[in-house]
Image (cartoon, rainbow, N blue to C red):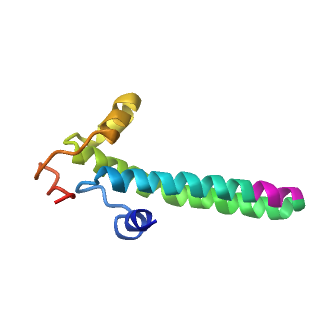
Amino acid sequence: MKWFLKVVMKHYADFNGRARRKEYWMFTLVSIIGMIVMYIVSLMLAFVSSTLGIICFSILGLILLALTIPSIAVLIRRMHDVGKDWWYIFIPVYSFILAITEGEKGSNRYGSDPKA
């Protein structure tokens, strides 16, 4: 949870620097689990009351919209950690491979090693 809060609070729209694997994957994990839980709760409340369902799904949509920028930012910083430019996020399989690859040791042109 601390990695999720770090990305959202400290690096909300920070596209510079580097993000280690743990930061990226913990943010992604918490986001996905949170969205699944909220979706299930929204579905259950929609069966109780359609108005309640509309409100919950609207809140879920706003949260998804709010998490779009930090999701892109942490993915770009993850690409920076492996020494690649931001546009590599548009190559689906390769960007996934880069996201699971260990970052470059020491400093690179995007900043110092976040593990150090």
Residue located at (66% from left, 63% from top)? 59
Quarter of image, res 64: bottom right
Vertical side of 94 occupied by 68: above or below: below
Question: What secondary structure predominates along the stretch shown in magenta?
Answer: helix
Q: How far across and how far down the image is residue 99, in percent?
A: 34, 41
Magenta span: 42-47
Query: Relative to residue 109, is residue 49 drawn left or right?
Result: right
Question: What residue sits 84% from the left and 63% below the top?
Answer: 51
Identify the residue at image location x=41%, y=31%: 92
Looking at this view, is 22 or 32 the one in front? 22
Residue 17 colored in magenta in the image = no
Decide: is 12 above or below 64.
below
Q: Nearer the viewer, residue 26 or 88?
A: 26
Residue 76: percent from left, percent from top? 32, 48
Q: Quadrant of the C terminus?
A: bottom left
Name the side, left or right, on which 92 lies relative to 116: right
Vertically, is 70 above or below 94?
A: below
Task: Name the spot of residue 12 as percent of width and height, x first.
Answer: 39, 64
What percent of the width, then of the height, locates residue 96?
38, 36
